[in-house]
């Protein structure tokens, strides 16, 4: 079946660090993606994890544990422009993306 | 990076008319294109998967006779909303998967905002 969960909304302060968690359950797995989506715009790719561990890319890092069905996106040195929705999605055995509902991240000064 | 374009970016039409949305991969060949719909404050909903040269695969609950998809080449897919009604007003986004892409990453178009009056 398709089951993927992430928090609906999170609030953080400019300059701080925030971790957005994503859990999933699937019998077929071909990797986990994180996308950023600003209001009224299409999603943009942030990261892809297919093996366990941490992938670091500038201020953003993504972690995956396949055995736990768990991933997180870590954003450091938050900037106001990071206010957006963050979507996690896993790719199933048919190479189709199964999307979470998205986490709206609100950054406060 | 790979670029996907959509046209038009926004459209307003009268109820009962048809609207065609184009999705193009500009600098790569896309074996597979996906059509999504997104209502305000909701996540992406996959409508259909389109493979070049074959019929699209529609998700459950999506009317194939209402949402016509054509994927005639490796760089172009079209979605036609036939006899549009106000409830079809939404943000339609296409994505394309590159022929040879280790990541199996999908590249998204900028989206088309459809308003049906």
Image (cartoon, rainbow, N blue to C red):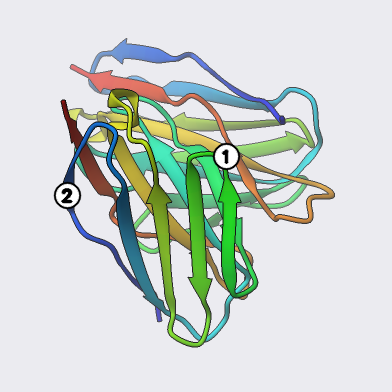
Whether residue B73 can be seen here: yes
Whether residue B66 can be seen here: no
Q: Residues within 10 Å of mark 1 (few under 14, many from 20)?
A: many
Please give the residue where the numbered disc 2 appears in the rendered image.
Answer: A9
Q: How many marks?
A: 2
Q: Nearer the viewer, residue A85 or B18?
A: A85
Question: In the rendered view, does B7 fall on the left or right side of A8?
Answer: right
Q: Are marks 2 and 1 on the same chain?
A: no
Residue B47 in the image: x percent, y percent?
43, 50
Above or below, A93 against A10 in this view is: below
Residue that appears at 28% across and 27% down: A39
Q: Nearer the viewer, residue B18 or B28?
A: B28
Above or below, A64 against B105 in this view is: below
Question: In the rendered view, does B6 fall on the left or right side of B71?
Answer: left
Which residue sits furthest right? Answer: B100
Q: Quadrant of residue B42?
A: top left
Q: Residues within 10 Å of mark 2 (few under 14, many from 20)?
A: few
Question: In the rendered view, does A24 fall on the left or right side of A14?
Answer: right
Question: In the rendered view, does B56 fall on the left or right side of A83?
Answer: right
Say which of marks 2 and 1 sits in front.
2
Residue A86 in the image: x percent, y percent?
35, 45
Please give the residue where the numbered disc 1 appears in the rendered image.
Answer: B95
Q: Are marks 2 and 1 in contact (CB under 8 Å)?
A: no
Residue that appears at 69% across and 55% down: B104
Quadrant (top left, top right, bottom left, bottom right) of the N terminus of chain A: bottom left
Q: On residue A44, which mark appears? A: none
Alpha carbon separation for disc pair 2 and 1: 25 Å
SS assignment at label 1: strand
Q: Nearer the viewer, residue B21 or A38?
A: A38
SS assignment at label 2: strand
Residue B43 in the image: x percent, y percent?
30, 48
């Amino acid at each position: 079946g398709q089951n993927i969960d992430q928090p609906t909304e999170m609030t953080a302060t400019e300059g701080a660090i925030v971790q957005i968690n994503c859990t999933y359950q699937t019998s077929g797995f071909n990797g986990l993606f994180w996308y950023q989506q600003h209001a009224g715009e299409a999603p943009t790719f942030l990261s892809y994890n297919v093996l366990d561990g941490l992938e670091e890319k500038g201020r953003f890092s993504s972690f995956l544990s396949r055995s736990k069905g768990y991933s997180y996106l870590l954003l450091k040195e938050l900037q106001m422009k990071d206010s957006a929705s963050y979507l996690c999605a896993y790719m199933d055995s048919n190479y189709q993306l199964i999307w979470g509902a998205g986490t709206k991240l609100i950054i406060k000064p | 990076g790979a670029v996907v374009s959509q046209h038009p970016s926004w459209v307003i039409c009268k109820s009962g008319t048809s609207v065609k949305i184009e999705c193009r991969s500009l600098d790569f060949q896309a074996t597979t294109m996906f059509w999504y719909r997104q209502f305000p404050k909701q996540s992406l909903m996959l409508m259909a998967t389109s493979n070049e040269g074959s019929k699209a695969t529609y998700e459950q609950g999506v009317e194939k006779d209402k949402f016509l998809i054509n994927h005639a080449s490796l760089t172009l897919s079209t979605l036609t909303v036939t006899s549009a009604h106000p409830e079809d007003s939404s943000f339609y986004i296409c994505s394309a998967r590159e022929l040879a892409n280790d990541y199996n990453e999908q590249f998204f178009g900028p989206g088309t905002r459809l308003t049906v009056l």
